[in-house]
């Protein structure tokens, strides 16, 4: 069974967590803003912009997710060290 969170403690917003959130939100914003890439030019090796832009975001999203995960681990280790607890 997991322990209940401490009463009266809200979520802590740190600059690292803001960067993590931006890394995870950026792909959604880029893909939901269809007007920015709903065109055929410029073509890349014969592939219209509409398609290669989306494929590029698959790779970009992967990199951003890896960065967010790494930052999250670093943040958790720092918080654990600040509490004086051992890492999991």
Image (spheres, rainbow, N blue to C red):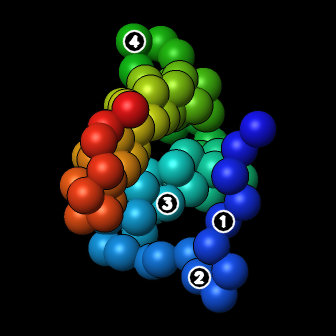
Is label 4 or label 1 in front? 1
Q: Secondary structure at mark 2?
A: loop
Q: Quadrant of residue 87?
A: top left
Residue at the spot of label 3: 21
Is label 3 or label 2 in front? 2
Precedes in sequence: disc 4 or disc 1: 1
Is label 4 or label 2 in front? 2
User: Marks 4 and 1, Cα distance to the nearest angstrom?
Assistant: 54 Å
Residue for point 68% across, 80% down: 7
Residue for point 41% across, 56% down: 20
Crowd tier of the residue under label 4, counting other residues whose Cα lies within 10 Å: few below 14, some 14–19, many 20 or above: few
Crowd tier of the residue under label 2, counting other residues whose Cα lies within 10 Å: few below 14, some 14–19, many 20 or above: few
User: Marks 4 and 3, Cα distance to the nearest angstrom?
Assistant: 34 Å
User: Marks 3 and 2, Cα distance to the nearest angstrom?
Assistant: 20 Å
Q: Is residue 71 left or right of residue 46?
A: left
- Residue found at the far top of this picture: 45
Toward the viewer: 82 or 62?
A: 82
Q: Secondary structure at mark 4?
A: loop
Residue at the spot of label 2: 9
The reply to whether dot 2 and dot 1 touch (C-beta < 8 Å) is: yes
Q: Secondary structure at mark 1?
A: loop
Q: Is residue 71 left or right of residue 24?
A: left
Q: Position of residue 6 (x, y in %)?
A: 63, 73
- Residue found at the far bottom of this picture: 8
Q: Quadrant of residue 51?
A: top right
Residue at the spot of label 1: 5
Q: Is residue 1 visible?
A: yes
The quarter in which the N terminus is drawn is top right
């Amino acid at each position: 069974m997991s322990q209940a969170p401490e009463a009266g403690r809200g979520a802590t917003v740190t600059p690292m967590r803001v960067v993590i959130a931006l890394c995870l939100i950026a792909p959604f914003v880029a893909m939901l803003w269809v007007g920015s890439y709903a065109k055929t030019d410029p073509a890349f090796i014969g592939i219209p912009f509409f398609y290669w832009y989306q494929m590029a975001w698959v790779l970009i999203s992967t990199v951003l997710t890896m960065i967010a995960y790494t930052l999250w681990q670093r943040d958790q280790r720092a918080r654990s060290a600040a509490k004086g607890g051992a890492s999991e």
